[in-house]
């Protein structure tokens, strides 16, 4: 088995313990960067209907990519998925009228360990596809998120 096959096998094994969460969200709904500081989750995200801009942020302090993000448009049409590894925060923005999607996770949801970083944190500087003149719809949790500097992050 080569190195690439071994890494793929490990990721598949991690997803064997799957918890599924289904979401139905409205246009301009934006969820800031959520993560679990204890019992971290890896997530495989897939859109069942609609379209979202999905973002993963590396929040492992020891990583050379700490605070860096990647984003991708996920839709029912393009059938793309995003793997968000443990140690990363996850956020999304709904582009279509509404969107329904599923997470396949490596660990169970533990709300007592959930943390949130502000969606518009300048140290991360995500280029969200928000239409000028519109405002994203945020939950209270996302309005009260932490800055990256003040957030409890991974070692």
Image: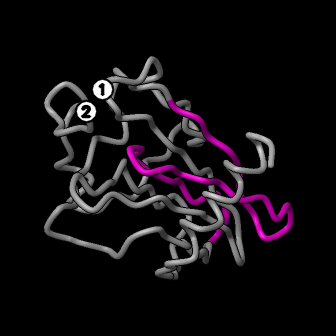
- Tell me the residue that label 2 is attached to: 155
Q: What residue lies at 71% left-to-right and 54% top-to-bottom?
A: 8
Instruction: Specify start and end residues of the magenta stretch as a single range.
Output: 69-97
Q: Quadrant of the C terminus?
A: top left
Q: What residue lies at 51% left-to-right and 58% top-to-bottom?
A: 28
Contact? badges 1 and 2 (CB < 8 Å): yes
Q: Position of residue 98 (x, y in %)?
A: 61, 73
How far apart are the two marked residues, 1 and 2, measured between alpha carbons? Answer: 5 Å
Q: Position of residue 101 (x, y in %)?
A: 60, 74
- Tell me the residue that label 1 is attached to: 61
User: Vertical placement of 110 versus 138: above or below?
Assistant: below
Badge 2 element: loop
8 relative position to 67: left or right: right
Is 75 covered by the magenta stretch? yes
141 relative position to 58: left or right: left
Q: Nearer the viewer, residue 81 or 54?
A: 81
């Amino acid at each position: 088995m080569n190195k690439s096959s071994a890494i793929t096998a490990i990721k598949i094994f991690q997803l064997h313990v799957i918890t599924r969460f289904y979401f139905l969200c409205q246009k301009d709904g934006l969820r800031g960067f959520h993560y679990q500081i204890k019992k971290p989750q890896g997530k495989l995200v897939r859109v069942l209907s609609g379209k979202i801009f999905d973002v993963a942020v590396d929040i492992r302090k020891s990583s050379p990519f700490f605070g860096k993000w990647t984003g991708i448009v996920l839709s029912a049409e393009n059938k793309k998925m995003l793997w968000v590894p443990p140690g990363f925060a996850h956020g999304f923005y709904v582009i279509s009228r509404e969107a329904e999607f599923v997470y396949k996770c490596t660990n169970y949801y533990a709300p007592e360990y959930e943390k949130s970083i502000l969606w518009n944190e300048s140290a991360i500087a995500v280029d969200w596809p928000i239409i000028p003149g519109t405002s994203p719809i945020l939950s209270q949790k996302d309005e009260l998120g932490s800055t990256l500097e003040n957030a409890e992050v991974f070692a």
